[in-house]
Amino acid sequence: MKNLILCLSIVLFLPLAFSSNFSSNLLLPSEVSSASYPSVLDTDGNPLKVGLKYFVLPILRGTGGGLILSRVVDKNVKNCPQDIVQDPNELHRGRPVEFIPAYPNKTGQLILKNNPINVKFYSPSATSRCANFTVWKMDKKYKYVVGRGKVGILNNIRNWFRIRPYGKGYRFVYCPTLCVPCKIKCFDLVISYEKQGDNADIRRLAASGNELPFSVQFKKA
């Protein structure tokens, strides 16, 4: 009888764990401490903070510049750029981003490792038409990262990412849950090189298959 109850519990829990509407506070640490989840640091060794702007740059020299919004799929200049790509010129820092934690009442003003965050390209005018296309989001096929997200919507899991240590820097990951301590398969973000006719390859930010993660560092803007 106990085995039957255990099996039923697992069957009932799994669909919730992978649902885009699953975001329970009960599964987060009751108290997030810097000891358990240290802060992400910028290139000056300072903790990343809410409200500040940072350039996302590759760790390795000669591998390109920062991240920007571009028109890859929809090239109509009348529409806002919504595809996130890497600038191929390493001298270009790209467009700065801001980080917004899912649970600021638990994490405070610091951006902690492995905690869910919104990533938002800085827009000088919050009222501009394209300001609504600056928040990172996984596309419907869970392949590319696009600028069609919304800030603070906990029940839309595709809007949330995490930062984890990787080598001498960090990597972005996408997890299909907001649960911090849960052991669940997550996907590294990589730079996907794609041919665009006779033009140079487009470097799109995408979810990894078996590729190495995009190793990054954060420079205060």
Image: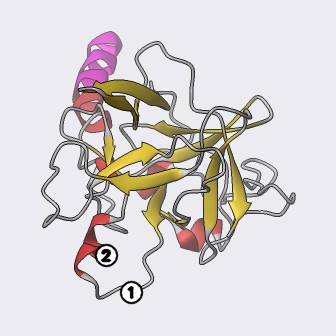
Can you name the residue that lies furthest to the front here?
198
Indicate the amino acid at tag 1: Ser
Secondary structure under the numbered disc 2 in the rendered image: helix
* Vertical side of 25 occupied by 210: above or below: above
Is residue 220 found inside the magenta-colored segment of the image? no
Front-lying residue, 212 or 79: 79
Q: Residue at x 67, y 55 (%)?
A: 112
Q: Is residue 204 left or right of residue 100?
A: left
Front-lying residue, 117 or 169: 169
Q: Residues within 10 Å of mark 1 (few under 14, many from 20)?
A: few
Check whether the beta carbons of the residues at disc 2 and disc 1 lie within 8 A of each other.
Answer: yes
Image coordinates of residue 139 in percent, x first then y, are 24, 42
Whole-number angstrom distance, CA of label 2 to CA of label 1: 7 Å
Secondary structure under the numbered disc 1 in the rendered image: loop
- Residue 87 visible somewhere in the drawing: yes
Q: Which residue is mark 1?
A: 125
- In which quadrant of the rendered view does residue 104 lie? bottom right
In the rendered structure, find residue 131 and report the number of the disc placed on it.
2
- Residue 23 visible somewhere in the drawing: no
Q: Is residue 60 left or right of residue 214?
A: right
Is residue 3 found inside the magenta-colored segment of the image? yes
Q: Residue at x 76, y 28 (%)?
A: 167
Image coordinates of residue 28 in percent, x first then y, are 53, 51
Magenta region, residue range = 1-11
Q: Residue at x 60, y 38 (%)?
A: 64
Q: Main secondary structure of the magenta part?
A: helix
Image coordinates of residue 191 in percent, x first then y, are 47, 31
